[in-house]
Image (cartoon, grey):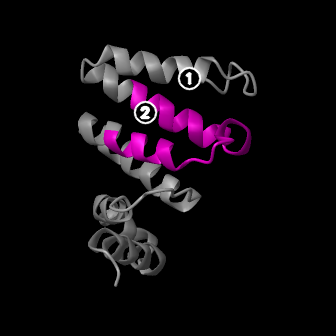
Amino acid sequence: EESRPSFRRSIGEVLYRELSEIKLEAHLFEVANLLNTDITDVTNIDYVQINLRAAEKAKDISAFDKCSYYATKGISMLPSDKWDSHPEMAVKLYSLAAEAERLLGRHSKMDIYCKEVLAQKSISTLQKK
């Protein structure tokens, strides 16, 4: 028997695969929330991409707490070699998380995200912006 969180994630997967791009954009937060219900040991670039899009959309509407949430979820789903395999996506997620934390007044969390990006030797200074 499938658990409730796993079932919700399955619904999110179906919606992600079946919705048109326009409908997905309209229901982006709902789909991201469903996909995020059961992320134990999940490394899925499609899920990361959905969370990145949701974080960007949340930032655009000044929902900084949600922006931080989606960016953090996306970061947690990146593979362990994220700085080599997906540097652009990693920088975007860490930057969104840092910016949201700054705007929420949580400067210690912002510092953690910034230091992580700045510590990466495998990406250029221009990519870190």
Q: Earlier in the sequence, mark 2 or mark 1?
A: 2
**How far from the left and from the top, in percent, is residue 37?**
32, 61
Asked which secondary structure carries label 2, the reply is helix
Q: Residue at x 56, y 59 (%)?
A: 44
Amino acid under label 1? Glu
In the rendered structure, find residue 96 and report the number of the disc placed on it. Answer: 2
- The correct choice, above or below, for 89 with respect to 15 in the image is above
Quarter occupied by the N terminus: bottom left
Residue 86 occupies quadrant: top right
Q: Which residue is mark 1?
A: 116
**Residue 77 in picture, x, y percent from top left:** 51, 50
Q: Is residue 119 left or right of residue 101?
A: right
The quarter of the displayed image where residue 50 is located: bottom left
Number of the front mark, 2 or 1: 1
Magenta segment range? 69-98
Task: Give the answer, above or below, for where 13 lies relative to 127.
Answer: below
Amino acid type for the residue under numbered disc 2: Leu
Q: Is residue 43 magenta?
A: no
Residue at the spot 68% in from the left edge and 36% down from the top edge: 83
Q: Quadrant of residue 31?
A: bottom left
**Which one is nearer the viewer's eye here, 23 or 112?**
112
Q: CA distance from mark 2 to mark 1?
A: 13 Å
Label 2 Cα crowd, 10 Å radius (few <14 / some 14-19 / many 20+): many
